[in-house]
Image (tube, rainbow, N blue to C red):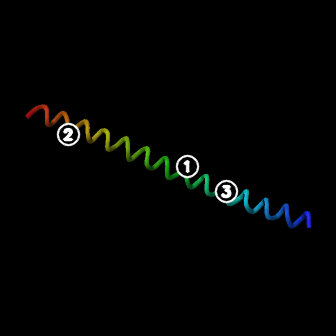
């Protein structure tokens, strides 16, 4: 019985670790997309100021 509980805990821990890794990857992608969009926004603002 105790071994079953430990297996369940190990499986949940592995799932949570995988979910956390996936979330961190998605956050990293969103941060990079945000950075690129900010750069593009600044560039467009500068073009607009020139006109």
Q: Select label 3 or label 1 by which is in front.
A: 3
Q: Quadrant of residue 49?
A: top left
The residue pinned by badge 1 equals: 24
In which quadrant will I find the C terminus?
top left
| Residue 44 location (% of width, % of height) | 20, 39
Q: How far apart are marks 3 and 1 (CA)?
A: 12 Å
The residue pinned by badge 3 equals: 16
N-term mark: 3 or 1: 3
- Residue at the image position 45 percent from the left and 50 percent from the top: 29
Q: Distance between the residues labelled 2 and 3?
A: 41 Å
Q: Quadrant of residue 12?
A: bottom right
N-term mark: 1 or 2: 1
Disc 2 crowd rating (10 Å Cα; few below 14, some 14-19, many 20+) is few
Q: Quadrant of residue 38?
A: top left
Q: How far apart are marks 1 and 2 (CA)?
A: 30 Å
The residue pinned by badge 2 equals: 44
């Amino acid at each position: 019985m105790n071994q079953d509980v430990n297996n369940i805990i190990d499986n949940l821990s592995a799932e949570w670790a995988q979910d956390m890794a996936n979330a961190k990857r998605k956050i990293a992608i969103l941060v990079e997309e945000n950075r690129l969009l900010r750069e593009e926004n600044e560039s467009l603002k500068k073009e607009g100021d020139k006109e």
